[in-house]
């Protein structure tokens, strides 16, 4: 068993922000949370929760708003549906929906802040975290990796302590301006100590091509930093809090995700690509979908 560094803590809680409006998917998200958009037969946020659970998470703290009740309903039991499926002997479907409620201990907190920005839903989870180190994963995107991406960064935390952020290489130089890019020094293969995160730099000004984004292990100290941040145009950003954490001398590491693929399902085009890819790889549908695509005779 790997021995933990003195600063390393057991990570059992994850904050999953899911309070946004999903404006890029309107009108579909007018009444349905964007996190509930389906990838074949599972909503996006279920993939996120399943990754967390596969990485040892026990408590899933989902930050919602008044328009996100569907998320709570999805992870709850549905006794009437269970009885119906049982009466119809639809065992596979019955097992699938019963499993959902038992994935984790779900805690729901509604975001009520006066400011926008992705640091505010993280701060909303403060009371459920207490003085523990914790994970953060966004509710509208995920990475499929072996082992799970979150497990990979937890392993880095166990070895080095500190905070850890998952990272992916941006192959196209023109795309670095879409991400927070790490100015860092290598610790070992695939692991870096971050000196600063440069937010959405111009291609010629990027300190590297390593985007730090997606999953985080953070100390409880981050809450006080967020509370004291000065909003930028009414928005409070997690990257600003992490840079302040680094400036305070607290170590922050980047972990390049191995054997993984990032699915940015908060973006329309990438969402459609994800659905197509999952359909092409699905054991029940891949044959029909491939035949259909061939029939389109695309140029």
Image: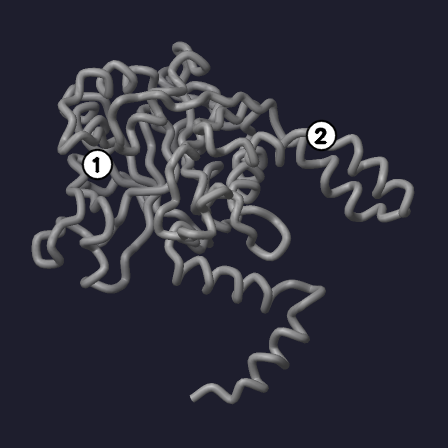
Query: Measured along the vertical axis of the image, is residue 44 above or below residue 294?
Result: above
Q: Pick whichever, 219 or 175, lies toward us.
A: 175
Give the labeled residue for mark 2: 77
Residue 14 position in % (x across, y down): 47, 27
Q: Position of residue 62 (x, y in %)?
A: 48, 28
Residue 194 tag number: 1
Q: Residue at x 42, y 28 (%)?
A: 135
Q: Position of residue 166 (x, y in %)?
A: 36, 41
Give residue 109's position: percent from left, percent from top: 46, 21
- Report which quarter residue 70 is drawn in: top right
Q: In the image, which disc is placed on residue 246?
A: none
Q: Which class describes the residues within 10 Å of circle 2: few (<14), some (14-19), or many (20+)?
A: some
- Work out whether 296 lies above or below 270: below
The answer to whether residue 115 is visible is yes
| Residue located at (53% from left, 66% from top) | 276
Question: Quarter holding the N terminus?
Answer: top right
Residue 147 in sight in this render: no
Whole-number angstrom distance, CA of label 1 to CA of label 2: 42 Å
Q: Is residue 95 left or right of residue 114?
A: right
Secondary structure at numbered mark 2: loop
Q: Is residue 118 left or right of residue 88?
A: left
At numbered mark 1, what does the secondary structure look like: helix, strand or loop?
Answer: strand
């Amino acid at each position: 068993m790997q021995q933990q560094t003195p600063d390393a803590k057991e990570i059992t809680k994850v904050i999953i922000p899911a309070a946004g409006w999903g404006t890029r998917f309107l009108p579909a998200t007018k009444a349905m949370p964007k996190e509930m958009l389906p990838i074949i037969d599972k909503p996006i946020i279920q993939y996120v929760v399943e990754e967390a659970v596969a990485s040892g998470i026990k408590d899933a703290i989902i930050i919602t708003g008044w328009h996100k009740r569907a998320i709570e309903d999805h992870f709850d039991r549905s006794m009437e549906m269970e009885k119906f499926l049982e009466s119809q002997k639809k065992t596979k479907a019955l097992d699938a929906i019963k499993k959902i409620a038992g994935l984790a201990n779900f805690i729901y907190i509604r975001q009520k802040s006066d400011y926008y920005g992705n640091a505010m839903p993280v701060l909303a989870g403060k009371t459920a975290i207490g003085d523990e180190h914790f994970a953060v994963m966004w509710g509208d995107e995920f990475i499929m990796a072996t082992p799970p991406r979150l497990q990979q960064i937890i392993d880095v935390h166990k070895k080095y302590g500190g905070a850890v952020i998952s990272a992916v290489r941006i192959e196209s130089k023109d795309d670095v301006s879409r991400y927070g890019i790490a100015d860092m020094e290598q610790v070992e293969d695939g692991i870096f100590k971050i000196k600063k995160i440069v937010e959405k730099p111009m291609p010629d000004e990027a300190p590297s091509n390593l985007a730090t984004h997606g999953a985080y292990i953070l100390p409880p100290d981050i809450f006080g930093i967020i509370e004291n941040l000065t909003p930028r145009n009414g928005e409070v950003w997690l990257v600003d809090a992490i840079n302040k954490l680094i400036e305070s001398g607290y170590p922050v590491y980047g972990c390049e995700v191995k054997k993984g693929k990032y699915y940015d399902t908060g973006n329309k085009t990438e969402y459609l690509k994800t659905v197509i890819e999952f359909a092409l790889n699905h054991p029940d549908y891949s044959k029909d979908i491939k035949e259909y695509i061939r029939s389109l005779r695309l140029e």
